[in-house]
Amino acid sequence: MSDIAIKPRIKAETKIERPRLYKVILHNDDFTPREFVVAVLMAEFNMTDGQAHKVMITADRLGSCVVGVFARDIAETKATRATDAGRSMGFPLLFTTEPEE
Ligand code: TYC
């Protein structure tokens, strides 16, 4: 028998997964004034007037538009605050979140 001791080399492997990101989606409706949508996008998502206008027009034409991608709690907070801004004025403006693939 050999005297050579063979040490098992077992390396602990720690897999760290990146937290999922969430899209905030703006939905079109027939009642919220365009200027109000633009103002909410600028205030809540730090967009310029030009960026906000493009996003608003895209949602208006296609039915919805991705506003941005954020960590889950940030996406949910922004979507809730932006939706509440519309509701406080009596508008059905809606922002939702969904996980990125
Ligand atoms: N469709 C609305 C109008 O014509 C404007 C609007 C655009 C509302 C985008 C919501 O996500 C929206 N007054």
Image (spheres, helix red, strand yellow):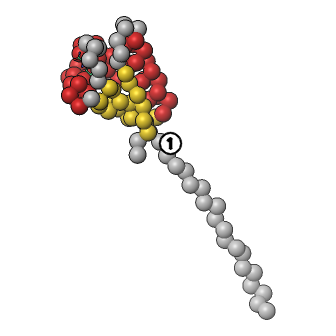
> Looking at numbered disc 1 in the image, what kind of residue is underneath it?
Pro
**Left or right of 25 in this view: 52:** left
Visible residue check, residue 30:
yes
The relative height of residue 6 versus residue 74 in the rendered view (above or below) is below
Graded by Cα atoms within 10 Å as few (under 14), some (14 to 19) or many (20 or more), the crowding at tag 1 reads few
Q: Residue 27, position in %: x, y?
A: 32, 26
**On the image, which quarter does residue 58 sit in?**
top left
The quarter of the image that holds ligand 1 is: top left
Q: Residue at x 29, y 24 (%)?
A: 28
In depth, the one of 9 and 28 nearer the eye is: 28
The relative height of residue 25 versus residue 35 in the rendered view (above or below) is below
In depth, the one of 50 and 2 nearer the eye is: 50
Q: Residue at x 46, y 34 (%)?
A: 71
Quadrant location of the N terminus in the rendered image: bottom right
Q: Which residue sits furthest bottom?
A: 1
Q: Residue 33, position in %: x, y?
A: 25, 12
In depth, the one of 27 and 1 nearer the eye is: 27
**On the image, which quarter does residue 32 sit in?**
top left
User: For numbered disc 1, what is the local secondary structure?
Assistant: loop
Q: Residue at x 74, y 84 (%)?
A: 4
Confirm if mark 1 falls within 8 A of ligand 1.
no
Q: Which residue lies under the disc numbered 1?
A: 19
Q: Which residue sits furthest top?
A: 89
Q: Residue 55, position in %: x, y?
A: 25, 27
